[in-house]
Image: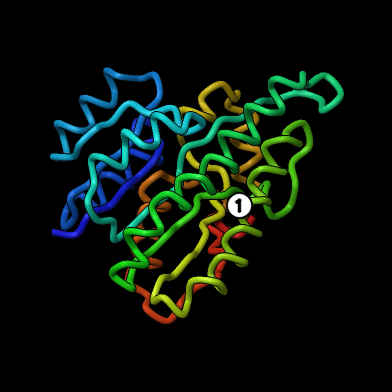
């Protein structure tokens, strides 16, 4: 059976990704702190949950011991912080950049030998519309997500000759735990800013990931799942 590694599997989008690919993959997903949710997700979809701080090399090495091959890697884990850039502490800045971009690059580098050995594989990075357009009061998050886009485009050129495709998804406003603190008025404003006049669901991102996995002539692309933001 094919193996998929999905980071951030205990979040809303992460759970949808686990659900989508557990249908025909052995899914190993990571979580950081929400053990209860991770165990529920693992049991519900027949997946394997691995506690992992992706910023720690020791945790990444422990994760890799759980997989002998990797057909699909989805770098989905991420954190955000709302506030003025001038109020952002150095520790917060480093944490966001490290979690949202650097850790994805490190995990990809660690997994690549498994893919190169087989001369096949898929890597999907979950960015954000803020990585495309930039978001006020989310400067560090926007910067990290923009970095993922650049990483995707450059790495796809490097790995094409090895039969490995690298793509990126840039979700818009998705109904998720990350956005649960927003007011009804703020959610309505986001919906009105889209061509479709609505917000997205985690399953929309999962279906986009399925497309990118199956589209054999697509690499180095950024797929917006944003309702026409």
**How are the colours assigned in the image?**
rainbow
Look at the image and tell me whether residue 193 can be seen.
no
Q: Nearer the viewer, residue 100 or 158?
A: 158
Identified at 56% across, 54% down, the residue is: 170
Q: Is residue 39 left or right of residue 205?
A: left
Most extreme residue toward the right is: 86
Identified at 63% across, 27% down, the residue is: 95
Q: Which residue is under mark 1?
A: 148
Q: Is residue 12 left or right of residue 178?
A: left
Q: Nearer the viewer, residue 5 or 177?
A: 5
Looking at the image, residue 7 lies above or below residue 151:
above
Look at the image and tell me whether residue 186 can be seen.
yes
Identified at 46% across, 76% down, the residue is: 218
**Number of marks present in the image shown:** 1
Identify the element where label 1 is drawn.
helix
Q: Nearer the viewer, residue 128 or 32?
A: 32
For residue 143, what is the image quadrant?
Answer: top right
Image quarter (top left, top right, bottom left or bottom right) of the C terminus:
bottom right
Give x and y (percent) for residue 130. 68, 46
Give x and y (percent) for residue 33. 39, 19
For residue 87, what is the image quadrant?
Answer: top right
Q: Is residue 208 left or right of residue 182?
A: left
Image quarter (top left, top right, bottom left or bottom right) of the N terminus:
bottom left
Give x and y (percent) for residue 85. 82, 28
Looking at the image, residue 10 lies above or below residue 127:
above
Give x and y (percent) for residue 116. 37, 67
Looking at the image, residue 19 lies above or below residue 1:
above
């Amino acid at each position: 059976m094919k193996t998929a590694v999905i980071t951030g599997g205990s979040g809303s989008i992460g759970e949808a990704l686990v659900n989508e690919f557990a249908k025909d993959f052995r899914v190993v997903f990571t979580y950081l702190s929400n053990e209860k949710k991770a165990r529920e997700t693992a049991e519900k979809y027949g997946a394997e949950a691995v506690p992992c701080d992706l910023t720690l090399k020791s945790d990444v090495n422990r994760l890799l011991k759980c997989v002998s091959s990797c057909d699909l890697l989805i770098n989905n884990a991420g954190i955000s912080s709302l506030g003025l850039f001038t109020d952002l502490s150095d520790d917060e800045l480093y944490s966001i950049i490290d979690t949202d971009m650097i850790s994805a690059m490190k995990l990809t580098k660690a997994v690549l030998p498994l893919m190169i050995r087989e001369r096949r594989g898929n890597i999907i990075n979950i960015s954000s519309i803020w990585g495309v357009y930039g978001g006020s009061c989310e400067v560090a998050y926007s910067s990290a997500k923009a970095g993922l886009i650049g990483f995707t485009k450059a790495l796809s050129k490097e790995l094409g000759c090895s039969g490995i495709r690298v793509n990126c998804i840039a979700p818009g406003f998705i109904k998720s735990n990350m956005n649960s603190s927003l007011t009804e008025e703020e959610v309505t404003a986001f919906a009105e800013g889209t061509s479709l006049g609505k917000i997205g669901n985690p399953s929309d991102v999962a279906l986009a990931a399925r497309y990118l996995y199956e589209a054999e002539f697509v690499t180095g692309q950024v797929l917006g799942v944003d309702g026409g933001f």
